[in-house]
Image (spheres, rainbow, N blue to C red):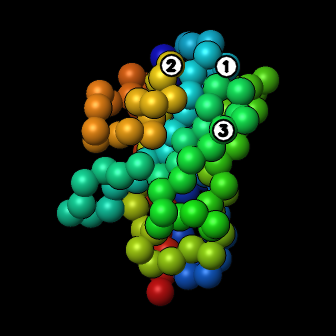
């Protein structure tokens, strides 16, 4: 299984950026997907989750209303559209897959998702 995240970069505060994660080696539509992030000196945190069909999504309070998670099962890809970016959004962003949606949204309260991507850096300049 491979999760290949890409699309990170440098953006000014208030700007937008989209990251994507292409999956291979698994039946993509059978897995819930999530985005997580880790800032320097901080623990990895949940950002957003999407169910297997894409009909259910959840967001961390810190990104609600600014970020949108979506997926294209035909392309085995999950996306994270980030708008109105803030300096504090600066982090390495990771995608993750698990057959259980609850595992994705209950990160740190339960088992870790089965599969993780390598991360992509998002830097927001103030």
Task: Classify 10 Å Cα crowding around label 1: few (below 14), some (14-19), many (20 and above).
Answer: some
For marks 1 and 3 on the same chain, the one whose residue lies earlier in the sequence: 1
Dot 2 or dot 3, earlier in sequence: 3
- x and y, in percent, of residue 26 in the image: 57, 13
Residue 105 tag number: none
Query: On the image, which quarter does residue 57 sit in?
Result: top right
What residue is shown at x 24% (from left), y 60% (from top)? 42
Q: How many marks?
A: 3
Q: Residue at x 48, y 63 (%)?
A: 61
Q: Say which quarter of the image contains residue 17.
A: bottom right
Residue 41 found in image quarter: bottom left
Nearer the observer, 31 or 24:
31
Check disc 3: other Cα within 10 Å, few if <14, some if 14-19, many if 20+: few
Which mark is in front, 2 or 3? Answer: 3
Label 2 to label 1, Cα distance in Å? 9 Å
Mark number displayed over residue 99: 2
In the displayed structure, 31 sits above or below 78; it is above
Of the image marks 2 and 1, the number of the one nearer the N terminus: 1
Q: Residue at x 25, y 54 (%)?
A: 43
Identify the mark at residue 56; answer none if there is no mark.
3
Residue 107: x %, y % from top left: 35, 40
**Label 2: element kind:** loop
Q: Would residue 108 be found to the left or right of residue 80 on screen?
A: left
Spot occupied by residue 2 in the image (x, y as percentages of width and height):
50, 23
Tell me the crowding category of disc 2: few under 14, some 14 to 19, or many 20 or more residues within 10 angstroms, Cα based.
Answer: some
**In-image side of 118 versus 41 (left or right):** right
Q: Which is closer to the viewer, label 1 or label 3?
A: 3
Q: State the CA–CA distance, disc 1 to disc 3.
A: 13 Å
- Asked whether the beta carbons under mark 1 and mark 3 sit within 8 Å of each other, the answer is no
Residue labelled with disc 1: 29
Percent coordinates x, y for residue 101 in the rendering: 51, 29
């Amino acid at each position: 299984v491979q999760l290949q995240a890409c699309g990170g970069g440098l953006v000014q505060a208030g700007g937008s950026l989209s990251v994507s994660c292409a999956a291979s080696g698994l039946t993509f539509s059978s897995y819930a997907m999530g985005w997580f992030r880790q800032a320097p000196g901080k623990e990895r945190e949940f950002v957003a989750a999407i169910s297997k069909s894409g009909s259910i999504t959840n967001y961390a309070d810190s990104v609600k209303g600014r970020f949108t998670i979506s997926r294209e099962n035909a392309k085995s890809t999950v996306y994270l559209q980030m708008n109105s970016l803030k300096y504090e959004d600066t982090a390495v962003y990771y995608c993750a897959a698990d057959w259980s949606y609850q595992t994705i949204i209950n990160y740190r309260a339960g088992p870790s998702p089965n599969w993780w991507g390598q991360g992509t850096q998002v830097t927001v300049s103030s």
